[in-house]
Amino acid sequence: MITAFIIGCEIAFWLFVLAGLFCRYMLKQKTAGAVLLLCTPLVDLALVVATVIDLRGGAAANFAHGLAAVYIGVSIAYGHRMIKWADERFAHRFAGGPAPAPLPKHGRAHAVREIKLWLHHLAAWAIGCLVLYGMIAYVGDGDRTAALLGVIRVWSIALAVDFVWSFSYLLWPKKDKSASPLQSG
């Protein structure tokens, strides 16, 4: 049940984004577009409420309940960035806007981008963990919420691996393979 609701929320998130962008650029209704884009957090709220109701109603927490908290953390930490990404592409494709700037693929700029993405991951993790601990405290039954602690452990490991990966580019920056080697002479 909760897994289907999470999938539904992900679909609803992107439907609100696409509807908002459609109104903004195709229908030239900037206010309606902004309202639809601002509705995306309501999807997160619905997911939190549904998850807590399910747990409070006696369901034993499983990975899907933990995934709901992960979804919320990621949506809050990355939501603006995801909407901006979609907005740039929609404006370029349908409203004559400039092409999105290419992402840095090597050197210091790439390292800085990777570190910023890790900081977003850290924010998502912190928000998600707060939601998970909140669920655990609200339910008040350690046996029924043990899976939520497992989600925190797995996500913490993933965050640590992402840290090593992202910050490694400071020590070993990606090289531009298309640049010609220096010629001696």
Image (tube, rainbow, N blue to C red):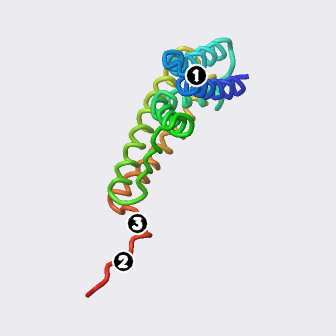
Determine the secondary structure under disc 2.
loop
Quarter of the figure with the C terminus: bottom left
Determine the residue positioned at 66% across, 28% down: 11
Q: Report the amino acid beneath label 3.
A: Asp
Tell me which numbered mark, 2 or 3, is placed earlier along the sequence.
3
Q: Relative to residue 175, is residue 55 drawn left or right?
A: right
- Residue 8 sits above or below residue 35 on the image: below
Q: Nearer the viewer, mark 3 or mark 1?
A: 1
- Quick check: marks 2 and 3 in contact, CB under 8 Å? no
- Residue wearing tag 2: 181
Q: CA distance from mark 3 to mark 1?
A: 42 Å
- Residue wearing tag 3: 176
Q: Report the amino acid beneath label 2.
A: Pro
Q: Callout 3 environment at 10 Å: few (<14), some (14 to 19), or many (20+)?
A: few
- Residue wearing tag 1: 27
Corner quadrant of residue 178: bottom left
Quarter of the figure with the N terminus: top right
Determine the secondary structure under disc 1.
loop
Please provide percent x and percent y for residue 146: 59, 28
Q: How many marks?
A: 3
Tell me which numbered mark, 1 or 2, is placed earlier along the sequence.
1
Q: CA distance from mark 1 to mark 2?
A: 51 Å
Which numbered dot is residue 53?
A: none
Q: Report the amino acid beneath label 1.
A: Leu
